[in-house]
Image (cartoon, rainbow, N blue to C red):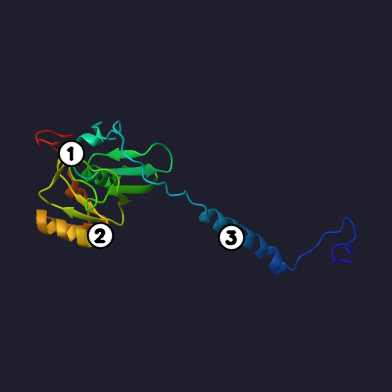
Amino acid sequence: MSAIASIPAGERVRLPFRVGRVLPAVVASVLLLAACGQSTPVPKPLEITKDTACSLDGMVLMDFPGPKAQIQHEQGAADFFCDTKEMFSTVLRPEQKKRIVAIYTQDMAKTDWAHPQGYWIDAKTAFYVVGSRREGSMGPTIGSFASEADAQTFSKTYGGKVLRFEQVTLDMVDLSGGVMHDRHM
């Protein structure tokens, strides 16, 4: 006969003092840890089509040279950018409120600068060349690369400094002036 079967009907089972206090805390901790393990799956990068427009200015991405970027949010559509400066400007602003689950840019060592397609890489692990002579859709841009060696090669050819994602600052991605540097975007 089991221990439960030997308890008369209607009797309360009393747990030892410590078990009665500790058990609820253990159960709550296990539930909290289980909830923490549930994360939003990281979406794959989306490809640019002839109709993909920049989220900031409406420019059609395929019409312009240089690296593009996209931000995937926990909810809602992805934001596309015709230039890496626009992506950084958006991510680095304190008023950014949407929960970001992925940021992608293009590996410019593998795609054509004049007509970049595909070759999406995780923007947070990429290497960036700031201050080069190469221009993107909005004039001077920031080249993006999957490998540091490719970024260094680009830097030696076109100038600029190689940085990691977290080293790029808001003052490096000033969007004032637009492509002609004659007005704010």
User: On the image, which quarter does residue 79 sit in?
Assistant: top left
Badge 2 density bin: few <14, some 14–19, many ≥20, Cα 10 Å: some
| Amino acid of disc 1 | Ser
| Amino acid of disc 3 | Ser
Identified at 59% across, 56% down, the residue is: 31
- Residue 33, percent from left and from top: 55, 58
| SS assignment at label 2 | loop
Task: Specify the quadrant that holds the N terminus.
Answer: bottom right
Task: Specify the quadrant that holds the C terminus.
Answer: top left
Could you say which disc has been placed on residue 137 in the image?
1
Q: Which residue is denoted by mark 2 in the rendering?
A: 147
* Pointers 2 and 3 in contact (C-beta within 8 Å): no
- Residue 160, percent from left and from top: 12, 55
Q: Which residue is denoted by mark 3 in the rendering?
A: 29
* Pointers 1 and 3 in contact (C-beta within 8 Å): no
Q: Is residue 159 visible?
A: no
**Which sits earlier in the primary sequence, circle 1 or circle 3?**
3
**Residue in the foreground of this view, choosing between 80 and 95:** 80
Q: Is residue 134 visible?
A: yes
Disc 1 and disc 3: Cα gap in Å?
51 Å
Badge 1 density bin: few <14, some 14–19, many ≥20, Cα 10 Å: many
| Amino acid of disc 2 | Ser
| SS assignment at label 3 | helix
